[in-house]
Amino acid sequence: MNDMGLRSIANLRYYRGGSGQWAWVLHRLSGLGVLLFLMLHILDTSTVYFVPTAYNFFVRLYQNPFFGIAEIGLGAALIYHAVNGLKLAVLDFWPSLWVRHEQAQRLVWVLFTVIFVPTAAIMLIRIINHYLANAPQ
């Protein structure tokens, strides 16, 4: 990492922004989370050809309730990253709209909430139903 990158990381401790800085941080973190998931997914799915027992292990591992909750977090990251990315694309195509970035960020949170809440509810209901159906009698 060059000296400029180190200074950028060191300067994160000084909070200078508002919703724009938090949007930047959340966009980067959500993107990294999605990237990490994709890399893990490619790795574990590829084991079906090379080490089928490892693939079966991963399938059983992902049936753990922790991973069900993590999938809801992945859904949140995907939705936020997508909606915020659309905001950035619109603002980049029409630079005169940057003066309204605060309102645009509020719209991102409204759209995120409208999309995420029902999605998370459906996912949570399916997780609960799965564990109730497979609970020991």
Image (cartoon, grey):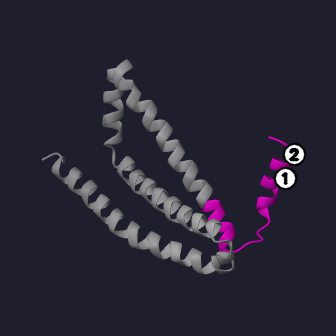
The amino acid sitting under disc 2 is Asp
| Image location of residue 115, percent across then percent down | 39, 68
Left or right of 35? Residue 134 is left
Q: Secondary structure at mark 2?
A: helix
Distance CA(mark 1)–CA(mark 2): 6 Å
At horizontal 50% and vertical 60% (from top left) the residue drawn is 82
Q: Are marks 1 and 2 in contact (CB under 8 Å)?
A: yes
Name the residue furthest right. 3
Disc 2 crowd, CA 10 A, few/some/many (<14, 14-19, 20+): few
Left or right of 4? Residue 45 is left
| Image location of residue 134, percent across then percent down | 18, 46
Q: Residue 51, can we see it?
A: no
Q: Which SS type dominates the magenta stretch?
A: helix
Q: Secondary structure at mark 1?
A: helix
The amino acid sitting under disc 1 is Arg
Magenta span = 1-26
Name the residue furthest front. 93
| Image location of residue 112, percent across then percent down | 46, 69
| Image location of residue 136, percent across then percent down | 16, 45
Q: Residue 59, can we see it?
A: yes
Question: Is the N terminus in the top left, top right, bottom left or bottom right quadrant?
Answer: top right
Magenta stretch contains residue 12: yes
Label at residue 3: 2
Residue hosting label 1: 7
